[in-house]
Image: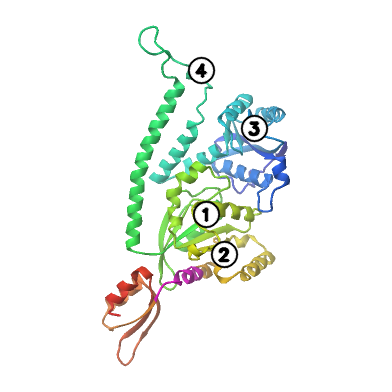
Amino acid sequence: MQPRRRDTRADRLSPTGSATGRALVIEPALRRQAAYAAATDRGPTARLDEAVGLACAIGLQVEYSGIVMLGAVRPATYIGKGKVEEIAGIVKTQDAGLVVMDCALSPVQQRNLEKEWGAKVLDRTGLILEIFGRRARTREGALQVEHAHLTYQKGRLVRSWTHLERQRGGFGFLGGPGETQLEADRRMIEERLAKIEGELVKVKRTRELHRESRRRVPYPIVALVGYTNAGKSTLFNRMTQARVLSADMLFSTLDPTLRAVDLPHGARVIFSDTVGFISDLPTMLIAAFRATLEEVIEADIILHVRDVSHEDAEAQLTDVEDILRQLGIDPHNGPGNKQKLIEVWNKIDRLDAEERARLANLAERRPVDARPALVSAITGQGIDALSAAIEARLAEGRPVIALELDAADGAGVSWLHRHTEVIGKTVNEETGRIAMTVRVDAARADEVREKFGH
């Protein structure tokens, strides 16, 4: 096994505060997959670093991490017997109470490894569920996480403890076997799942009512998406002056946050910060958080925030695009997309001058409708250019209307400033009338024309 020892003091993903337990992180990798990996695929070392980051995100104290190269997956323990024994020795030496296996384990594999190592074992799905459970703050988020967690646990009810032995039941002394503890646990989970599903129906109905109320005041929605820890929340805070939690930590934000913002030329938009994406996101969580990601599906503009300073930026791009396709969004601005996606190359403050110049030249060579915006959410560099790009993209397909108002119609002028994008405004010195040129959402154009007799 190839060990990776980390200096936890220098680990930028490690949160401050006391750890919740001593842990090992193991990255199993098939030799044939590593040998034929494409340039956009994430290598075992990068995957291990990400797994350690996930463990640190819930306060685990990672004492040891390493890569296990496999010729084939073993049905009983996933990894070979020799590696199982080697890791058992490390668990004992490090006095670890938890081993994180960065792969998908079957219930039998998980149980067998726990017996061999005398420690709790979490696979990638279980680890991500644990993080989601700690981060969810809204009612819907908590319900969605609990639903996904119970669905995961339902398949993990295995006959591994004495309290799951059969109990006698029925009438008289000759009654047949009654309900096992295993069956009782499964029944309780199914009952709780049914109750959560009922509560989610109510929560989703409330969310739809909120969405309908926003449609009646049709402000464009700008949704931020991207790989976890790409800087979405920091960018959201920079552009909206909000105080959403933004930490250099995987999955620091889970619940969607919306804020109304006035762009430089007066157009009002609603920014939506969403959950970060990650490679091999459990399918049950994609389904569970689909309601959260509905803001992305309905958005007028999608900002794909990328961490261009990350060594696996291209692999992260592929992962995000795959999830966008699952949501029915063409990441390359297909004809049905109305050119809604803008790439945001974030964290350029971490690059040297030569690399920044190279990326700027690369961006300039792209077509205008596919040109990324280079920004630093931390320093504010490039934010004005990004705002201008959002305004320009929103302007496409929005009619421009020229109006004349009486000088005394202050209420009308105020209404136009609140509900339209005022492009130009002049006063005729001879007549005293106010000439205004406004850009308006297509759904509101007729209302503007009727209100001002145009």
- Which of marks 2 and 3 precedes in the sequence? 3
Q: What residue type is labelled 1?
A: Leu
Upstream in the sequence, badge 4 or badge 1? 4
Circle number at residue 78:
3
In this picture, which residue range is highlighted in magenta?
387-399
The mark total stands at 4
- Asked if marks 2 and 1 touch (Cβ < 8 Å), the reply is no
Q: Are marks 3 and 2 in contact (CB under 8 Å)?
A: no
* Residue depicted at 42% across the width and 24% down the height: 184
Judge whether residue 398 is colored magenta. Answer: yes
Separation of marks 3 and 1 at Cα, in angstroms: 31 Å
Query: Vertical placement of 66 versus 340: above or below?
Result: above
Identify whether 121 is placed above or below 298: above
Query: Horizontal and vertical percent for residue 344?
Result: 55, 62
- Mark 2 / mark 4, whichever is N-terminal: 4
Give the foreground label among 4 and 1.
1
Q: Name the residue under label 4.
A: 162
Mark 2 vs mark 1, foreground winner is: 1
Instruction: Name the residue nearer the viewer: 419 or 332.
Output: 332
Front in this rendered view, residue 178 or 353: 178
How crowded pointer 1 is (Cα within 10 Å; few <14, some 14-19, many 20+) is rated as some
Element type where label 3 sits in the image: loop
